[in-house]
Amino acid sequence: MLIGAAEASAQGGGQQQAPLGFPGPAPVATSPLPTGRVTYRTLTEINNELERIAKANPDRVKRFEMPHKSVLGQSVFGLEITHNATVSSGKPVFVMTGVHHAREWPTAELTMEWIYDLLKNDGADPRFTAMLENVRFIAVPVVNVDGYEMSRGMLIEQKRRNCRVEAGKFPTFAECANPANRSNGVDLNRNYGVFWGGSGASVSPAGDSHRGAAPFSEPEIQNMRELLASNQVVVALSNHTPDAKVLRVPSANEEPVPADVVPYDSLAQLLGGDLNWPAGPWPKIYYTASGTMEEQAYYSAGTFAFTFENAPNQPVSWRFHPPYSFVIDQYFGTGAYPGSSSRAGYIRLIEAAANPKLHSVLEVKAPAGAKLTIHKSVSLETSPLLKSDVATDSTRDAAIKFTQELSSSLVVPKGENHVTWHVNPSMRASQHSSEFIREAWTVTCSLGGRNQNVDVVIARGETKAIDLSRCR
Ligand SMILES: [Zn+2]
């Protein structure tokens, strides 16, 4: 089956750099990874491969460019992978990301190899065939493209954050690469709006976990915000290194126990088993953080969202991107990481996305060719912010409230008068207590200038039938 992998490794072969810690040219070698790779990809290689994979698999892969360019003006690309990728459908969505943090190179590799793995085994292994039949998988291998280029290109090898040098201004490549600016940048996994500005995030632009000047101040996170809001993302994973944890919300101390902690934590614990790592909320098994991807995804849409802290137990010198053999071992749970397989976790997550008990299902009657839109406008909050941004000031100001539009759509296929639409629950977890807020989705059918709406309240695990056949 054509997946573009052979071509990819053939092209990459000449450009491969020596693995870290090994002088001279890269050894001629191969690995059990789907592409056989033995070295970390550059950003250019990743972007070229995404293009090649999409071209080689037009029925199963759609490449997309995210709506905002990075602070250096670079495009950010992702892939949508499913059977009949060009046809809209009501399949549940699983989103996976790499490289929120620039120096965490293994996270791009794990995401890329999982893409090849899915495509290679689709049609050959019934379990994988079912994954692409039942789920739409969206991958963004490098969220922080500028930072990755700085780190992978060894200009600022230990860069964590993005290329923002001064709030509100767009820097040049040279300004970001300038050693004098190496302590600048926004921590992209502290820049999401939900609970932004709370514990475990730094106000100071020089802080390692700098939250940014405002919630969603960074274009790279505006991209992620819009991706999460414009798809029915029922499960999401943010890949990181190197601390051997499976994390879910709460990530900040300000948060309550999530309203549906039982199914959410059950999935976390199963993932913990796949990785042989502790699994649970950040403050309990890790440190605290705020403005993270999980918080945004879970509190806005009810997405069961996680972080994997991959490729652990490394010496400080190469902690965040160890020699490539550790990527291979982490992927399969072999060698240095016996019984700790990221791949097993990814299989678990995509199969969880396919499981209707973990999200909601609308059985929609509507005429062929009609456009169906599901919409909700939700009110969200940052963390309570300090009156002054001085940590010693204990006087708390109010949180910033903001509105998040959630909207996604599909077209009823030709010859059909019914669509099964896998969606997130309309009942939303409160940011303030372990309760749900009773909210409704508005589902609209449009065809030939006629519209019909219906409001539907639906909980996780429920299926509801709605009739929009009068929009004809
Ligand atoms: Zn990280």
Image (cartoon, rainbow, N blue to C red):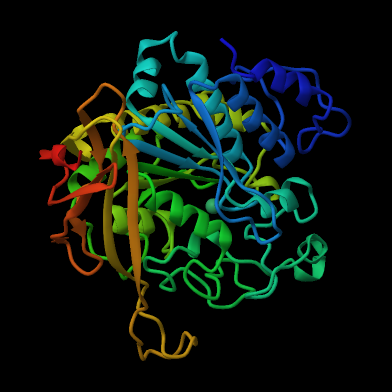
- Is 132 drawn above or below residue 226 in the view shown? above
129 or 413, which is in the foreground? 413
- In the drawing, does residue 222 fall left or right of residue 281? right
Q: Is residue 409 visible?
A: yes
Residue 445 point in image, percent of width and height: 23, 44
317 or 365, which is in the foreground? 365
Give residue 72's quadrant in the image: bottom right
Give residue 254's quadrant in the image: bottom left
* Residue at image location 21% in from the left, 58% down from the top: 429
Residue found farthest to the front: 448
State which quarter of the image contains the N terminus: top right
State which quarter of the image contains the C terminus: top left
363 or 310, which is in the foreground? 363
Residue 39 point in image, percent of width and height: 72, 30
57 or 41, which is in the foreground? 57
Residue 448 point in image, percent of width and height: 29, 42
- Is 23 drawn above or below residue 248 in the view shown? above
Q: Is residue 280 visible?
A: no
Residue 390 point in image, percent of width and height: 49, 87
* Residue at image location 47% in from the left, 43% down from the top: 244
